[in-house]
Image (cartoon, rainbow, N blue to C red):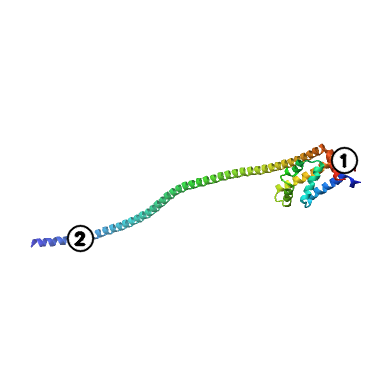
Amino acid sequence: MKIPFLICLLSLSLQCFGNKTKPKLVNKIDSLSDVLANKELEIKGLQDSIMLYSTKFNKLKSRLADYEVFKGESKGNDSAVWEYGSSIVAILTAIIILFGLVYYNSSKQAARDAFDDQFENYSSVIKHKIIQAQLALDKLDSRVDIIDEVEEDIDKSSKSIENEFK
Amino acid sequence: MSSNNPYKKYFNELESLIDKILTDRPMNHDFTRLEHLLRLGGLSNSTIKSLYQNCGFNSWVEFYDTKRGICSSDKLLMIDCVEDKLKGALSSLKFVFRAKTAAVA
């Protein structure tokens, strides 16, 4: 009978004690709760900040990667431009040299043809003059031969003419 | 007076005959007569033949046939050669007989 009594007494005393300390504890819990809420808000704000900075960082990282890619492509484009340009220059140079050679050869050939034509004309004129001179000389020789021949026996031929054309 | 000059007659006939050969249509007997007149003037047969042979013809007939059908510049040169020689022969004979022609006339 004693033990239940003691237990009851203890519980009653504890109840009496609880009734005295409860307001302090509640207040403390409330303040702790406020603090916790504030901390939560701060954490959330920090989390948002972290997320924001993370996003910004990712954006910057992406831009940096793009820049690196662009830089690489730019270098590639530069080398490609150089190769293309040098090829164009080489081709143009070759074309210019080719045209130069063709122009030189055609000019040389044209000059040679002109000289040949003039020489042929000159040669043909000389040949014609030689033929004319030979013909004139032949005519002159023929006349001289006839004169010499007729004069050799002019008396005989004179008698013949006089006899036939009395 | 001039009609009795045998040299004038000779040269008239020779000149007209050569003119006929050069500008008209001569016959075979015209060339025979031409050779006879040239022979009278003192030309030998070889000289008479040389008038056409040296120009590339074998006879007067070949010369005349070629003249009627000239088809190239070479042939024209050959024809001119013979005609020039005939004119030359006439002028040479006139030159040789110039004194006799003048004396008789």
Q: Secondary structure at mark 1?
A: helix
Q: Residue furthest right?
A: B1
Identified at 57% across, 43% down, the residue is A101
Query: Is residue B21 in view?
Result: no
As shown in the figure, which amino acid type bears the numbered disc 1? Lys
Q: Which residue is mark 2?
A: A18
Where does residue B25 sit, x and y in percent of width and height? 77, 52
| Quarter of image, res A121 | top right
Q: Measured from the top left, where is residue B58 in percent x and y?
A: 71, 45
Q: Report the amino acid beneath label 2.
A: Gly
Element assignment for label 2:
helix
The residues bearing labels 1 and 2 have C-alpha atoms spaced at a distance of 196 Å
Residue A135, percent from left and from top: 74, 42
Q: Residues within 10 Å of mark 1 (few under 14, many from 20)?
A: some
Name the residue rendered at 83%, 48% in the picture: B13
Up/down of A48 relative to A126, above or below: below
Measuring 90% from the left and 42% from the top, which residue is drawn there? B104
Label annotation for residue A160: none
Quarter occupied by the C terminus of chain A: top right
Q: Is residue A145 left or right of residue A84?
A: right
Q: Is residue B12 left or right of residue A138?
A: right
Which residue has dot 1 on it?
A: B100
Q: At which x and y percent is residue B43?
A: 79, 41
Among all residues in the image, which is located at the extreme left? A1
A32 and B75: which is toward the camera: B75
Q: Chain of mark 2?
A: A
Image side of residue A79 versus residue B41, left or right: left
Res. A43 image quadrant: bottom left
Q: Nearer the viewer, residue B46 or A8?
A: B46
The answer as to whether the residues below labels 1 and 2 share one chain is: no
Q: Residues within 10 Å of mark 2 (few under 14, many from 20)?
A: few
